[in-house]
Image (spheres, coloured by chain):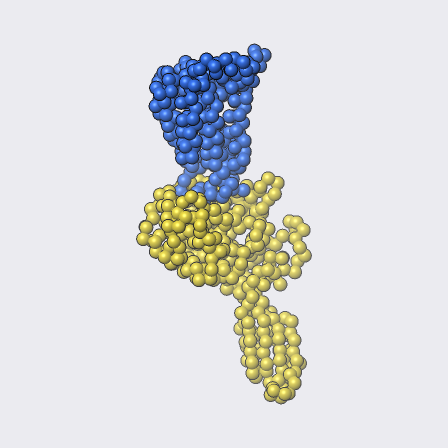
Chain colours: A blue, B yellow
Amino acid sequence: MAWALGLTGAIMLYLPLYPSIGGSAQMQQMIDALPQGMTKALNYDQIATGPGYTQATLFGLIGFLLMSMASIGWGAAAVGGDEESGLLELTLAHSVTRVQVVLERALAILVRIALLTTLVFVLVLVLNGPAKLEIDVGHLFGAVLLFAALALLSGTAALCAGALTGRKVYGVAAGAAVAVLGYVFNAVGRQSPDVEWLLNLSPYHWAYGNSPVTNGADWGAVTGLLCISAALIALGTLALQRRDVGV
Amino acid sequence: MTQAIVVKGLRKKFGQREVLHGLDFAVEPGTVFGVIGPNGAGKTTTMRCLLDIIRPSGGSISVLGEDPRQGGTALRRRIGYLPGELHLENRTTGRRMLEHFAAISGPVDERHVNDLADRLQLDLDRQTRKLSKGNKQKLGLLQAFMHKPELLVLDEPTSGLDPLVQQVFHAMVREAVDGGATVFLSSHVLSEVQQAADAVAILRDGDIVTVSTVEALRTAAVRQLRFNSTGTKAHDVGALLARVPGVAKVAVRELPADGHASGTVEATATLSGHIQPLVQELARLHLTELVLEEPDLEEAVLTLYTGGEAPPSTGNTQRATHQPEGAHRA
């Protein structure tokens, strides 16, 4: 709920400002005056168009931050946090399998991410006209899907690490590593051809490299991100299945 | 009927540290089996192995005729478990939590739940985070008992409960056993187990020191004896006591005449083992007073904890081996 409020707040704050920020010639001059490395790192090089503005501010920055935090929190708490607090022991003593527990909790995360991203989709759609964003609905749908898949990836990384170790903090670390390193590799990789290879390691770049709000989703990236998430869940399940709980 | 629990050679290592060194015990169906031992003796580890929460490093376990690793959900449905360190979801009420567990391990008769909650005087509609330790423990007991399982595994069930509620708990255990259930419970205090258990295993440093009935333990335990008699010389009283098996620490003295019949002898001693031989000998005397105290089982068990008269354990060679029933090491 708090995450929904946060996302709503961010969207309501950023998107209506587009006509006065991204779309204005004055702003464009200011951005041109900034060092190119910085605009590239922040994805502000595309800020002059409605879709580019939405991509850079919402999906690329504030939305990404909020969704990653939410997802990592849920992922780390799902198994590792639950075990650390001693709750998992009682649950597993009941008539459930460990596979069932991990899968159901992964599903719960998926559902929550789906709800939040649906909210984002609807809000952007509502503001599309009033804020003169001129976003193609199909492209928006693809971008939201990538937005969700990217959040899911850091969440499942957190879940997997939590299931491997039984510690929440390792889950948070793993999830944050995926999100932060993905972001940093993208920001640095875009600076010069010498470090461009970093982009290949960045889930953030896989998702947003082609500016999906402007150009539509790269479906290969959607599939790829979802497959890695699925693999992480499977690995977490396997790990929990094989080890002692709560020791 | 097969035994409810059979544990053979159970070992558990955490890394390099072995915490269970090959436990052997069996629990007859329809009985209450208590495990006592100090913290860290391996009680909780043993129980977690029975529930497949942790996996043994060696040995075999059979719970209700099945291996916990193979039995899976169907087996755990037949077990009610109370963890030693009970943690409950904070953002829920007792009722919602029980409904959740009932959905997993049910079917559960809701009247039974309400009935138990009434008896334990537990308000199910309060937020769990606002419950006191004792009330959380009641909720833990409720989720273990509510689906009327065939086997109850209860780790320190009475911890945090006030004496009145402890009585309710003991009644619940008796009812479960009368209904055919088997109860496996642990405590670090003997007096708790003593009230409920038919058989007791004493666990120390990952070894079973002895398995015996509470009765046998009582026999093995040391009682304080004190009596006054008249008409017999102090020396003869001492000689008579010395003939009784199990009597030790005999002290006899003539009491001063004032306030007592002349020639009154007061004797104190300790008795371990059976009472009958003592009573037969005492019948020869003319007693004016006799006190044979309730044996201090706590004391008896502590003797076993510390290895009796043996020096502190220095490794495998000093480890106590399985004792025959009622064996006494003092």
User: At which x and y percent is residue B318?
Assistant: 65, 53
**Left or right of B255, for residue A96:** left
- Is residue A115 in sight in this rendering? yes
Numbered label tally: 0
Q: Residue furthest front?
A: A26
Question: Could you tell me which quadrant the N terminus of chain A lies in?
Answer: top left
Q: Quadrant of residue A129?
A: top left
- Using the image, determine if residue B285 lies above or below residue B44: below
User: At which x and y percent is residue A70?
Assistant: 46, 31
Q: Nearer the viewer, residue A31 or A98?
A: A31
Question: Could you tell me which quadrant the C terminus of chain A lies in?
Answer: top right
User: At which x and y percent is residue B177?
Assistant: 40, 57
Q: Quadrant of residue B270?
A: bottom right
- Using the image, determine if residue B97 lies above or below residue A225: below
Query: What's the residue at 53%, 58% (across, down)?
Result: B189
Q: Residue furthest top?
A: A193
**Left or right of B120, for residue B265:** right
User: At which x and y percent is residue B312?
Assistant: 66, 55
Query: What's the residue at 40%, 52% (across, down)?
Result: B142
- Using the image, determine if residue B112 lies above or below residue A244: below
Q: Nearer the viewer, residue B26 or B258?
A: B258
Q: Nearer the viewer, residue B262 or A116?
A: A116
Query: What's the residue at 53%, 60% (across, down)?
Result: B190
Query: What's the residue at 44%, 51% (across, down)?
Result: B131
- Is residue A159 in sight in this rendering? no
